[in-house]
Image (spheres, rainbow, N blue to C red):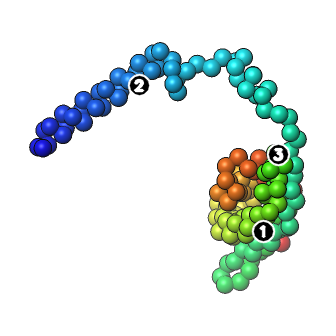
Amino acid sequence: MDVKKLVIIFSVFLMLSGAAVSVMKWLQVGPFEVVSEEEKAEEVAAVPDVPPVAIEMEAMNIPIFADDRVAATVMIKMSVEVIGPDNEEKVTKLLPRLGDAFFKDLYSFIPRVIRRQNKLNASILSERLKMTGDQVMGPNVINKIIINEVTER
């Protein structure tokens, strides 16, 4: 086949897919379906009310190096909040692995944050640890990370 035929076939395919998306949007079907507030409320009501469980982790001591010596040590006390007994069991079982992943990530992350902002922010740490936790445990296992205390020595 020569290049002109390939370009024409690709162009036709592109136009057809664009037309299909436009029709789906106009008809409000598939991913473009309009969901009413009542249906959203029913979906939220279908989820059982299970209180979140906080799992305490050991305090982490992260050394910060400057010029081949320890310039400071950051101590972080935190807990992992999960919803549901299955998630609680899974996190409890893999807590050492989760703590190791948190330590490795914070070891490189904290010095960069301190260099930029001169201070650690608990909300930034919580978001970062949530991302790391989702990588280790999988999505929708950890609800949030609660930072109880951050101390710099």
Residue drawn where x is 66% and y is 84% of the image: 68
In the image, residue 127 sits, relative to residue 29, either above or below, namely: below
Residue underneath mark 1: 96
Decide which of tag 1 and tag 2 comes sooner along the chain: 2
Q: Mark 3 to mark 2: distance in Å? A: 39 Å
Residue 124: image x %, image y %? Answer: 72, 53
Which amino acid type corresponds to the residue marked 3 in the rendered image?
Gly
Q: Nearer the viewer, residue 135 or 129?
A: 135
Judge whether residue 20 can be spotted in this image: yes
Q: Nearer the viewer, residue 76 or 46?
A: 46
Q: Mark 1 to mark 2: distance in Å? A: 47 Å
Q: In which quarter of the image is the N terminus?
A: top left
Q: Which residue lies furthest to the bottom in this view?
A: 68
- Kind of element beneath mark 2: helix
Residue 123: image x %, image y %? Answer: 76, 50
Residue 40: image x %, image y %? Answer: 70, 23
In the image, residue 7 sits, relative to residue 58, either above or below, namely: above
In the image, residue 25 sits, relative to residue 74, either above or below, namely: above
Residue underneath mark 2: 21
- Badge 3 crowding class, 10 Å Cα cut-off, few under 14, some 14 to 19, many 20 or more, is some
- Kind of element beneath mark 3: loop
Q: Nearer the viewer, residue 143 or 76?
A: 143
Which amino acid type corresponds to the residue marked 2 in the rendered image?
Val
Q: Mark 1 to mark 3: distance in Å? A: 20 Å
In the image, residue 126 sits, relative to residue 108, either above or below, namely: above
Residue drawn where x is 77% and y is 47% of the image: 143
Which amino acid type corresponds to the residue marked 1 in the rendered image?
Pro
Decide which of tag 3 and tag 2 comes sooner along the chain: 2
Residue 59 occupies which quadrant of the picture?
A: bottom right
